[in-house]
Amino acid sequence: MSQVMIVVEFETKPEHRSQFIDLMREHAERSRRDDGCLQFDLMLPKDDDKHVFLVEKWRDQEALEAHAKGPMPGNTYKDWIVGRKVARGAPAD
């Protein structure tokens, strides 16, 4: 079993940024309680009011798949963002 890391970069619309951040904070708090969640953090870049990042670390692919079947924000925020990029990988250590 190898750990899985995910970094999701969202570009938010200015008028919805605080709503989006609140929604993602709630999602992160819920996700941290999932079995196999080793890290689930919201990151706000310094001097950048457009982007929001989620940094996730999962025990293994199975834990990530179980998380994906749970409650998710879904399409709640689709009109609040300009775009999203996802990077997946494994820890470098």
Image: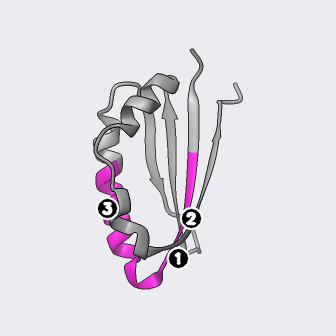
Residue 32 part of the magenta-drawn span: no
- Magenta extent: 7-27
Above or below for 78 versus 67: below
Residue pictured at 59% horizontal, 74% vertical = 47
- Where's residue 92, x and y in %? 71, 29
Q: Which mark is residue 72?
A: none
Give me the C-alpha separation between circle 3 and circle 1: 16 Å
Q: Are marks 3 and 1 in contact (CB under 8 Å)?
A: no
Give the SS element for disc 3: helix
Residue pictured at 57% horizontal, 30% vertical = 4
Q: Are marks 1 and 2 in contact (CB under 8 Å)?
A: no
Above or below for 53 versus 51: above
Residue pictured at 31% horizontal, 64% vertical = 22
Q: Where does label 1 land, which residue? A: 49
Q: How is the image coloured?
A: one colour
Give the SS element for disc 2: loop
Of the image marks 2 and 3, the number of the one nearer the N terminus = 3
Indicate the quadrant where residue 93 lies. top right
Residue pictured at 51% horizontal, 34% vertical = 57
The crowd level at tag 3 (other Cα within 10 Å; few <14, some 14-19, many 20+) is: some
* Amino acid at dot 2: Pro
